[in-house]
Every structure is written in structure tokens, then in C-alpha cells.
Image (cartoon, helix red, strand yellow):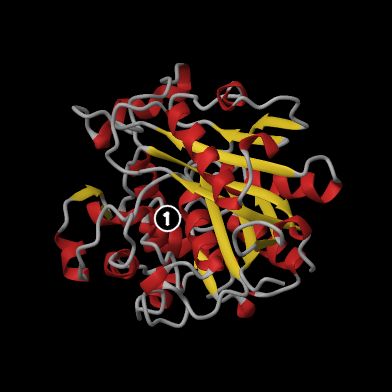
Amino acid sequence: MAATATIAGLGLTDVGKVYGRSATDFAAEAVRLAAADAGLAVTDLDGLLVSPGTKGSPKLSLQKVLGLRDLRLLAEIHALGASPAAMIAAAAQAINSGEATAVACVFADAPLREKGSARDAFGTQRALPSGFASYHLGIGAITPNLFYAMAARRHFETYGTTSEQLGAVAVGQRSWAAHNPVAQFTKPITVADHQSSPLIADPLHLLDCCLVSNGGAAVIVTSAERARELAQPPVDILGWGQAHPGQVMRQGSDFGLRTGAAVAGPAALRMAGVSVSDVDLLELYDSYTFTVLVTLEDYGFCAKGEGGSFVSDGKLGPGGSLPCNTGGGQLSSYYLTGFTPIVEAVVQGRGQAGARQVDKKDVIMVSGSGGVLEHHATLVLSGAGR
């Protein structure tokens, strides 16, 4: 597939324990940084897609904060962790159809408070359900940790997957983070460190769980032709796909065994005209180590149930045969939902990743996952400059 839409600008604010700023502040800065990075003025934008964080911001009113007038495209896209990849796909479609010429896609959030707990950032800010839907509150099932633990346990019991195999994912990503100047955690870890970290929700340990971060990220999507005249090397958008299985967590379902990646991944590869054997680099949504493992299976990098053995030999880490989450991912670098893997994909695609730069970047596969494995979006990108 010849790319007609390209990521031409990237903006990343300070991320992590950055206090005293709203999600809207972060979002506005990220868009301004992305426009400047591309060599554009903010007023050159004629499209804006926003994805809200935990408190519902940024909103469509970000347009006014940025001083944008007469936009041809303006929308909120909210599919949780799948939102950023879905936004970029929508922007590419707008560029390809001529609906817009330069579209900013942005996510920002500020769940952390200086005197608050990262542990509570996602478990206490959502409206609590009522009626039968509230049954899980009685057993303390409030945060995503418990539900992902249920998914992982299902996989363990069905296929013999082990905690040590999940630990191999965490170890590899921490090794990559050591070379990322914006990563929150860079100290090397071992599988033994993973095993001795506190148990959060059996079988998930602390080092299986993603970070909580404040900050914002944005990209500018424009045409491949226009991108050639701009400031940065283009990262072409070759394919995309979404899947929303609508499954429920009940006996007899395939919860924890199969996700929307099984549909969205192949769809994106088909659009791009490539296969898993062509993929040089993976940037996968890693809310938990288990998310990486099950995504690899569903994308077809290994057979169903073989994800544990597939990741355990170090192939995802530095020097491995299938580089994955080369910035450290959400486990070690920072958490900006589905934008974390996208940012690293763009940096790698441009060849600007410094000590962690991979050799081949012709085909980069990126995932976003939302809810408890409920929503999935995939992008296939290329830094080949074609």
C-alpha cells in the first residue's frame, strides 16, 4: 500500500509526577509542540481530534484554547486505550479523502495529585454502578488490577502460562527504558526482582502493572506529499484496524484467551499489504505484562497459548529478534494510554531514538487496548520514507 497520510509532527510534554497542571493545559502544550516540531504554525491546522482523560478533559473546547478558527474536522474520540490509534486512523481517512489537510490528534491526563496515591488514580474517579451491575463492589473489585488478574489467571489455567514468563516482558522493557531519557524507571530488573515485587492481584505483581502519569502527547497527520516539505522525517500510515468484541466476563466466554487484537491486527496488516513476518518493530499497549503476551498471540506472532514460551527467551528486549516497546512502554517509561506506544513508534520511525534505535523500521506495528481487553485498535506505520 502506498501511504497517502503521514505523521509529520510529534509533541510530548513533561510526563510523570508533574503537578499543578490540568489535562487541558497538557493537551494545548502537546499540540503546540507537535505543530512546531513539524514546522507548522498552530493556525495551519484545520482538524483537531481529542481523547479525554480520567476526568473528561480535554474537551472540544480545546479548539478555543488553541485559538483555532474554522476547523474542517473537530471531534472527541473515546475508546479508552484504543482511542489514540483510532484517532490517527480517523485523521488519515480525513487526509486521504481531502476533508482536512493537517489534523492534530491529542490525549492528555492529570490523574496524579501531589499528596494523593497513584494506586487510587483510576479506581476512585469513575462513577460507581448501581443495581445488579454493582455486584462486584461487594468483593472489592473496583480497580482494573483485579479484572486483568482474572484474565491472566484464565490464561494460566488454560495454557500453563507462568508468572515468570510475564516477568520476562517486564525485564525486557526495563532494559529498553534504561536508554530512554524520559522514562520514569530505568534501573535494570531481573525476573527474580519481578517475582519478589509485591503481589497486587494474584497472579499479577507490582512489576506487571503500568505506571500512572500526568502529561500529554499529540501528533500531526498530513499528506505524504506535504510532509516532504516539512521539518521532520515522515512516518507513513500504511494500515489500521479496530475491533470491539463486546464479550462479558463469564464462565464459558473467551475472556482472557482472545481479544480484539485477533481481528484488528490482521485487518491492519492486510490494508498495509504486509504480514507478521514483515514486521520489524512492535510498540504494544502494555497496561499489564499480560496485555503484551495475549496481543502477540492474537496478532499471530505465535500460536494461541504459546505466548509465555515465546516471550521468555528475551527476543523482545535489546538485541532480541523482535524488538518490542523500545522506550520502556507503560510499564517502565510513562503512561499516556495508547499514545505511549505511538510516541515511541514515531521516534523510532524517524531514526531519532539514540542508543535504543533499532536497525530496521520499515514496518512498525502499534496497538491500543481499552477497558479490560474490550476495545482494540491497530496501526501499521513505516519509517522507510516511502
Q: Is residue 271 left or right of residue 9?
A: right
Q: Position of residue 364 (x, y in %)?
A: 58, 68
Name the quarter where the N terminus is drawn.
bottom right
Residue bearing mark 1: 286
Q: Residue at x 59, y 71 (%)?
A: 300
Residue 35 sits in quarter = top right
- Please state which of residues 148 and 386 is positioned toward the viewer in this rendering: 386
Q: Position of residue 5 (x, y in %)?
A: 74, 56
Q: Is residue 192 left or right of residue 3?
A: left
Q: Residue at x 75, y 55 (%)?
A: 226
Residue 319 sits in quarter = bottom left
Q: Position of residue 88 (x, y in %)?
A: 65, 48
Q: Is residue 72 left or right of residue 286?
A: right
Q: Residue at x 14, y 60 (%)?
A: 196
Crowding around mark 1 (Cα neighbors within 10 Å: few <14, some 14 to 19, many 20+) is many
Q: Position of residue 183 (x, y in %)?
A: 31, 56
Image height of 211 relative to 163, above or below: above
- Please state which of residues 161 and 342 is positioned toward the viewer in this rendering: 342
Residue 375 in view here: no
Q: In the orientation shown, which residue stands out farthest toward the top?
A: 131
The amino acid type of the residue labelled 1 equals: Asp
- Please state which of residues 259 and 85 is positioned toward the viewer in this rendering: 85
Q: Residue at x 33, y 54 (%)?
A: 182
Image height of 143 relative to 353, above or below: above
Residue 140 sits in quarter = top left
